[in-house]
Each structure stands twice: as structure tokens, then as C-alpha cells.
Image (cartoon, coloured by chain):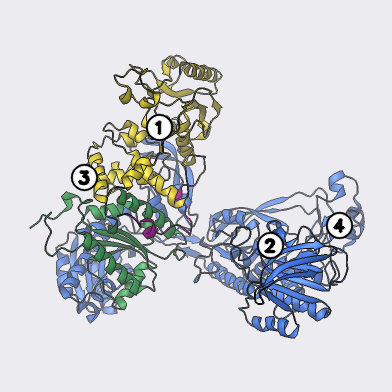
Amino acid sequence: MQRIGVFVCWCGSNIAGPVDVERVAEAMKSVPGVVHSTTYQYMCSEVGQSRIMEAIKEHQLTGVVVCSCSPRMHENTFRKTAQRAGLNPYMVEIANIREQCSWIHKDKEVGTQKAIVLAKAAVAKVMLNTPLQAGTSPVIKRALVIGGGIAGIQTALDIADAGYEVDIVEKSPTIGGRMAQLDKTFPTLDCSACILTPKMVDAAQNEKIDIISYAQVEKVSGFVGNFTVTIRKKARFVDELKCTGCGACMEKCPSKKGKNEFNMGLNNRTAIYIPFAQAIPNVAVIDPEQCLKLKTGKCGLCERVCSAGAINYKQEDEVFERQYGAIVAATGFKPIDLDAFDEYGYSQSKDVVTSLEFERIMNAAGPTGGQLVRPSDGKHPHEIVFIQCVGSRDTSGCGKPYCSKICCMYTAKHAMLVRDKYPDVNVHVFYIDVRTPGKNFDEFYRRAVEQYGVDYIKGMVGKVFPEGDKLIVQGSDLINGKQLALQADMVVLAAAIEPDPSARKLATMLTASMDTNDFFTEAHPKLRPVESPTAGVFLSGVCQGPKDIPETVAQAGAAASKVIGLLAKDHLVTNPCVAQSNELLCNGCSQCERVCPYGAISYVEKEIRGPGVREVRRVAQVNPAVCQGCGACTVTCPSGAMDLQGFSNLQIMAEVDAICK
Amino acid sequence: MQGTAQLILERARELMQSGQIQRVLGWEKGEFEHDPTPAFFESEEELQNFCYNDYCGANLSKYLIAASKLEGKTLVCIKPCDSYSLNQLITEHRVNREKVFVLAVPCPGMLDPVKTEGKDLSQGERKDYLLDKCLCCKGAEHKIADETIEGPSLDLAPEDRFAQVRELEALSPQERFDFWRGELSRCIRCNACRNVCPACSCVKCVFDNPNSGVSSKASADDFEENMFHIIRAFHVAGRCTDCGECSRVCPQRIPLHLLNRKFIADIDELYGEYQAGEEAEQRSPLVNYQTTDKEPSDALKGRG
Amino acid sequence: MQVRQDWKPKIVAFCCNWCSYAGADLAGSSRRSYPADVKIIRVPCSCRVNPLFILRAFQRGADGVIICGCHPGDCHYTSGNYYARRRMTLLFKMLEYLGIEKGRTRVEWVSAAEGAKFSSVMNDFVQTVTALGENVKLEDLRCKEPLN
């Protein structure tokens, strides 16, 4: 039998003014289960709290109702009070008679009556409370970063800097990501490689960082603090430990038809290759699709020239498991396919290129050695047209509804670089809006226009088509109200960016949610921007939404600090107000699993024993370390097997009954 | 029909002899032609009582929950409309697909023994004697099958299944209230609707569970009649395939399917057309959402 | 039907802990009054509100039930209010179909910053329910106080 104590707070005159607190306390004495009811000026004060503690002991209270301010204010205070007196902290309920009563009702009779009802509802609820224990779960002090671009590298460096071990899993043969492909960076125009490659070296040399390149995550199980991840390291056919990166194999390789991914397919590479000079690890890899030895068995030249004996045609994929306390998604982006935008002639002319391809053309280590020439005939162009928002801010369904955010700035950068290096080249930019919200961004754009004479045309391009060796760009100039048909030698398309396609699969494995554009969703769009709603999973870089390099680095650091905050704990204390499944009632229908935003529900085949029951059933189990206690599952469950501790069906119905009486 | 029954039997016998199946779930001959009942047949001998005639309207899929727990495979005779229920049960892991051999059987539309009682069937059209659920037939296609028995199907343009829902919606609130009070007040809480419903498959119903806080065995007040049927319809919303069994078995002839169809009509209108059990592994609209879903206030606008 | 002279409606408001309950607190701290007929039950999220609770409230004598949650897109649990939105839309449409006055049920999104909105929503809801009068269609006679 419950023995409930009711403590009515005056809150000075805040409550005691508009509510007759003595009458409330008196009325509660006749409520079944209440054995003690009293008032005090300030329950939250030391004196008030000790009165509660004394009463708990003196009256052997099993539950406490404090009629006071909002539970959002002092629920924790009074829970701790109860705990200090030896009562389970979850045997406390608050009746909010200040914010939701005394402060809004001027009539004392009305306020007092309502306070009594609210107190009765709290008593009805606390009668059904059960002692809850906050559980703990250990934290494995190692982090996994998925993706080795600037986001992943920065996150890993920051985590390692705090003294924790961290693995980077990168799907391509080298880390570096998109930033490694860039020529210059806006708005400072410093060389991308010059600022990125030292970070790559730092990551490689850091004892706490293990770079697992040419690898992918295959499976994730477990939960915050305790993930088990299966990693598949693809066969390179080159022993990473032996290869010195000398490049002799590349010189001899007779198969030269592989598309050079690093140069966006603008030129070819050998079957055995190192993606670029500063690759990390600086180790060759054999493309099995192109290698004559692997395809036909005839060749083996690289093996013969390798003085380190690193070539191993029999190498197989390596699959292994590792354990982590935290996981960071840093899967980055790619430009969209332009198949749906053939009006811009991308498939019809080699001289229509994407901005990322243009980066490679402008880059000294790129396919043209940094010379601005047309991909079709190697001739120097004289007129270049840039088209912005290709597939961005597109609600037609062909492209992406969002703004890709970086295109305005890199287009200004490209235009400026061209004009700076080749003053004889005329540059036109078609735009919808120019968006430059960033430090020194607008100044940068204005320099392109004012200092470098880039011709910005507000309007959309309708069509690009080849005519002779020229490209005709038909567009509208909205400011001058004209239709234009420009003759261009090259056209550069600022293609929208989209999340890397690997992200979707990863999100499923991590039970991390994604938006309709396949960007990872944050736990809170404003207040928890680097955490996924799935506890222990964090977000870094463009996988969460379009951003430029400085923003990516900032977010990467923020994600790292969240990871460090988690790994610094030896144990996680779990919120006991979580869902619980009654196995005797569970149908195993999986509906609850589908609504759980945290992936906290799993199913097991279990022998169920109950009155008149003994059989193996599929039943739901809630992982209390992962469940956040929202209750979505409880309403999905038709049999009522799923219930929420602290907010159980019976507790809420008891409150309803008390209020409606 | 006799031809079809023969084909089913032959195939069932073969599969039983070859050991591929352990038992058959079908219909057993009753005392009269119009009262066959669902039954398991464990041997060829028992199969002598198998029948498949014009009165085999019963949906057998729910019995597979129990059959999934038994040794060996069960051959089940599934009519096109039953196949939706079976898919839904598989999606919800209530039926183990591997334990079931789905024999898709053709259906020419089933007769309603109440409508045919004392009638000379050669008078009038077959349509006049069909079960109500057959008048809104979902078509002759089976949504799940291991093997299909060919045979005659229902040759009838289906009626608009939402016509009655729309008619009710067009009434005033008081008229609707009076209509449903008139219908639901006849409820005797025999639980036949619940027991037959393939979506109502809880191991223990909340209304039977004394710890649920809402248990009620018999309706002591109008409220409890309303409560039981509202909650039952809500619990199967998004999962109900509109098989119509609830209304077919109701001894009081309460048009319970009009509750389920209301949910289906609203789901179709608000969240896009959805047919539960169309295929396995679908996500029911109630465990799904779009960020652009209509606001309740907008959805409730319009007629009082 | 005999109408009590001083009849006031009973209103149950389910408020999610993170937005609407905080919005109600803000209404209080900024002294924005609304009728005392509204009694709030705190739930972690609007998705915790079971249709059973709503019917229970009507059974026990409530005249109106309102569910308040975070604005779509702002749910503390990311998606809870989206599920609640579908469930409540369908349930309320069903109640309407059964002839229950639709003014007795409502869903409102109130953020922690919208104290004024909380108050105006409650004022408006109480007014609507008062105009509808006592809930007789979903009452349970056994739970009614006898008329004096």
C-alpha cells in the first residue's frame, strides 16, 4: 500500500497569493493513500527540502507529491531530495500549481479548486509509480570516423588530439576526399592541396589514428558506447606494408585505359596506380577491371619491376570487426549526374564541363598541367560561360530543391582565376541570385565583378548546343529584358551537390535518420546540429547538408568535441524513463520498431512462459541505453505490450480520471 | 466449382503424399451446402470432407498464425481477397512464410447464406446473392501464391466501396450519431468481428486484459460499445485489408466494415492510396509520415 | 436536456514536455491567463498520446480534449509529432464520422516560446467547447455526477 506525502509550496506569495495553500493541503488529507499533507513557504529551499526528507522518514512515505512550480524547474531538485531521504527518486511527482495555476488565475476560489484537482492528479499518478533505476553501460574508448575527406580528417585529428584512438574508414584508396581535387579555395585563393596535405600527413603520422583506406563499413550493431562494426578492406593486390610508393609499377603498366577518378575521368590512368602524388597511404592499388594479369593471367610486369616485392595478385578482401564507443559519419558529397539536364549539352560536347572538372583543368597537377584548354581540341578558349544552379533550387523534380551553397562562391573563384591568368578570355556567369553570406565572401564576389570584369548576367540558360566548334548558349538577361545567344568556347556547369550514395546504406546500418534528400538528420536542427538522433552517432561535413570548407572544419571539430565528451565517460547513465515491452503481450509485429527514431527496438525469438503459455515467440526488446523515452512505440502497439516507464498507460489514465472527476 | 474443388484436392493429395506439406487448411463440408467451415485436414482420409463451394467466403489466412507454430508446412487455400490478409500477416511476422504453401484458388464470388435462404437461385442474377464484400471485389489476382489453380473468376464490375462512407459523411453530425447509435447499440459483444479479423491478431486483446485499464467483457454502457469499435478500428487502421469478414460474421448484421473503410478512405485521401497487403514488407501509413502531411485542423475543415 | 446553470466545460490538454508544456509554463510566467477549466497532463511527446486516453477522458466526463506538441520539424524526438499528426487526424475524423462534434477535439502545435499562443489557443478552445455544451454523445452515464 502506498503512503503518499503531499507538500504544497507557497512560493512566497507566488502561489500562496492566488491559491489558498492551506485548503489545498487540507483537501489532500482526505485523498486515499495520502498520509501526510503540509505546506511551506519555499519547498525548494534547504529548509523546505529537509522538511520533505524528515516527513519521508517519519511517515515512511513511499511516494511524494510536491505542489509547486513547473517540473521543468524543480523536478530534479525534489528527486534528489527524495533520494537523500532513501526514497527512489522516481517516486516523486510534481503538481504544477504556479505556472499553470496561480500565475494565470486571479480568482482565489478558482485557483484553489484547480490546484486541488492538479494535486489529486499527481497523487493518482504517483500511486502507480514504480521505483526506477538508472542503468549504466560501459563506454569503449575508441571512435570510428566514416569518410576520409577534410571533415573526417579534422574530426579524427581532434579526437586523437584529446588522447583517444580513432579509425578512419575511407572507401577510396586514399584519404583527402573532394578537397584534394580542388585547385584553389575561396575567398583566400590559397592552394587547396597546400592546406590539406599537411593535415593528411598529420593524420597518417598520428599514433592514435588508424587509416583504413579502400574499405567500407559492412555492418553495425550495438549502441552508444558499445558499437561493433564489421569493416571490409578491399583487396588492393599490393601489400600496403611493403609498397614504398615509388611508382615504378605505374611506369611499366601496359594497361592505360582506366578512367582517372581523381581527374574526374578527364584523362586515363594505368591499371596499377596511386591516385595522386600526395596520396595517403602512398601505396599503389590495382584496378581489377583493368589489370591484364588479373583478367587474363598474362602480364605481371608490375610484379617484376617492384623491388619491394609488394605486388600480390592473390590478395583477397579482408573482413574484420572492431568495437567503438562513438561513430562519426563524414561521407561527403558528389556532384549530381547531369543526365536529367541535357539541355546544357553536357553529353553532346566535351567542352561542356562541370565545375569540379574545371577545378582539375585549372590545377597544375591536373590533366592539362594547369593549362586552360578545351577538352575537345586542346585549343585555348576565348569565351567561357558559367551556368549556376544546375540542378540546385530546382523544384521541377529533375534536380534538388535545396541550394548547394558553395557554387556561387566557387564560380566567382573560377571566373576570377581565369581572368587573372588569361586576361584575353571573356567570362560570363548566368545566375539566379548570387549568395555570398560568409566572412569576406561578398567582397570576394565584388572583386570578381569590379576588379576582374566578370560579366554577371541575371537569368537562366534555356539551352546549350554545339555549332561548329563553338557552343551556343541561349539564355535570358532579366535585368536588360533580352534574350541572349552567346557563342562560347567552353561552358562550365555549377552542378548541384548531393550526399554520397554510400550514405543511404550507412544510415540504414546506423539507424540514423535522413531527410528526403538523403542528408543525415540532426538530433535537433538548432541545438544539436552535429549529433544524429541515434545516440553515439555524430555528423561531420556535407553528409549533414551543403557546406563549404571552413564550415565543414568547424562542424568536424564540433563533432569531435561531442565524441570526446562521450569517450571521456567510463560509463553512461541511462534515463530509466524508457519503453519496456511485456513479452507475454507482444505480438512480434514489428510496428513499434518502425516508428522508433533511435533503432532502440530489436526482436528476439524467445521461449515465453506464462499462464497457459509455453512457446517460442518473436518478441520486441528495448535497449534502455538507446531508447530516449518518446513513447511513439507505445501507441503503435495495439496489444499494449509496449509501455513507457514513468509515463505508463495506467499512470496517464489515472491522471485523466482524476482531472475529469 | 466442383471442378475447382477437384483440382485443389488432387493437388493437395499429391503434395501430402510427397511429404511437401503436412496438412491442408481449407473448408470442411457442413450439414448443408451453405455452411462449410474452416478446418485443418491432417490426412488424406480427412480430406474426404474437404469442400470448396459457393459458400466458402471465410478468409483462412488468420488460422495460419496457429499453423505457423505446428510441425511442417501447411497448404492453405487462398482466394484473391484473402491473399491481401496473408501478405499483411507475413509483413507483421505473424505468419511464417516458410511454413506455408500458398495454393491460390480462383473465386467466382461467394454467396451470402442469408441472402440465398429460401430463394430459388435460378431466379435473378448471381450478383443478388453475393456476399456484400464480393460486390466490392478487389479482382481476380492473387497477391501471393506458390501455385495457382485456374478456374472461373467473378465477372462483375465492382461497386464503389466508399459510396456508403460518402453517404454517411454527407449526413449531419446528429444524423450520423443516430445512425451509428442505432447500429452499435445492437452489438452484443460476442467478439466475432474481433476473432475473425486477420488484423486483430493480438496474443491478448487490450479489452481482455485486466491490467490494461480498459478491459471490458460486455458493454455496460453506450460508451463502451463506441469505445470498443472505435479502438478496434483504430488498431487495425492502416493494416486492415478491407476483407469484410467483420461484417460478414456479425450476427447482428452491424456494418462494421464502414468503420474500417472510413479509415481507408481518409488514409487514401490524406496520405496517398494505400492497400494493406498489396505486397509484403509494406510500411503501413500509421507507422509512416511525410513532413508535408496535412494538418489535423485542415483535414477536419469542411462540413460540420 | 437539463442544463446546469453554472456549467463549465472540462478540458484535458495533453502537452509534450519539450515544447507545449514549456509554452504553457511561459504563458504562466508571462501571466497570460486562460480558463481554469483546462487541466494539463504532461507527456514526453505528442506521440505518447494514445487514442485510449482521449476516449477515456470523454468517458470520465471531459467535454473537450486537446493535444499540443512541438511544431512539425521541431520535435525533440525528431519524428514523434509527425506520427501524432497522422494518428490524431484519423482518430478525430473517425469521431466526427460517428457524429461527435469535431470542435471537441483539437491538435495544436505550440512551441516553448509561444506562451501567448498557448493562452489564446486555450481561450479559443474553451469557448468552442462551451458553445457546444456538455458532451453527451461520448459520455458514460456511470461516470456522471447526478444532477442536483
Quickly name the residue at label 2. A334
Numbered mark located on residue B222 in the image:
3
Q: Compared to A318, does B56 lie above or below?
A: above
Q: Colour of chain A?
A: blue
Earlier-in-chain disc, 4 versus 2: 4
Q: Looking at the colours in the rendered structure, which chain would you say is drawn in yellow? A: B
Quickly name the residue at label 1. B135
Q: Compared to B235, does A55 lie above or below?
A: below
Quickly name the residue at label 4. A270
Please indicate, yes or no, whether residue A584 appears anywhere in the rendered image: no
Element under label 1? Answer: helix
Farthest front residue in view: A482
- The disc labelled 1 sits on which kind of residue? Leu
- The disc labelled 3 sits on which kind of residue? Asp
Toward the viewer: C63 or A490? A490
| Quarter holding residue B239 | top left
Which residues make up the magenta segment?
B283-304
Please indicate, yes or no, whether residue A55 appears anywhere in the rendered image: yes
Q: Alpha-carbon distance for marks 4 and 3? A: 81 Å
Please give the chain letter of the residue carrying mark 4.
Answer: A
**What is the chief secondary structure element of the magenta stretch?**
loop
Residue A403 location (% of width, % of height): 61, 68
Nearest to the eye among marks 4 and 3: give it: 3
